[in-house]
Amino acid sequence: MSTEPELPTFERPPTAAVEALGGGDLGRLSDVPVELAVEIGRTHMTVGATLELRPGSIVVLDRMAGEPVDLLVNGTPIARGEVVVIDEEFALRVTDVVGEHASAAAAAAPAAGDAAALKPGEAPPITGEPATA
């Protein structure tokens, strides 16, 4: 019988993405269910190789051990973090929220006349250290 561990809640100022959606008035959406998933990696296989999988088979993923994993909401990546164990259950410690880096990088992007300026439709690079608790 498993009970969910008690985790602390944190107050957080609205992000630029929330403010862009109407200043943080998302109360109407608070009861909408979403699926959260943690993705540790991906790979490509042929149908034949997939059909040959048996107990004990090893599938090599595109991520290195210790590299951050992705937190997905309804299949869309929203954050990255590290897998931790709390009371014998897996959990995710969020270290990087996807929209925060994009907003910060856009604010720090070079001016349009700068030689290093981004081209139209080009996303700014994600840089910086993960947030620490």
Image: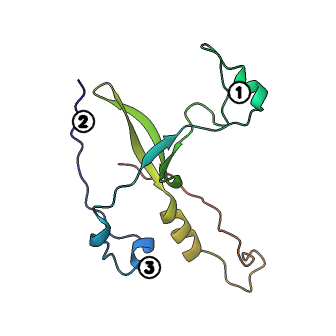
Label of residue 4 in the image: 2
Mark 2: amino acid? Glu
**Tag 1: Cα neighbours inside 10 Å, few (<14), some, or many (≥20)?**
few
Helix, strand or loop under label 3: helix
Please tell me whether residue 12 is drawn above or below residue 60 in the rendered image: below
Mark 3: amino acid? Ala
Q: Residue furthest top?
A: 56
Q: CA distance from mark 3 to mark 2?
A: 34 Å
What x and y, as percent, mark residue 99?
50, 64
Please tell me whether residue 63 is drawn above or below residue 9 in the rendered image: above
Q: CA distance from mark 2 to mark 1?
A: 34 Å
Helix, strand or loop under label 2: loop
In the picture of the structure, the residue carrying the numbered disc 1 is 50
Please tell me whether residue 73 is drawn above or below residue 7 in the rendered image: below
Which is nearer the eye, 97 or 39? 39
Label of residue 20 in the image: 3
Q: Earlier in the sequence, mark 1 or mark 3?
A: 3
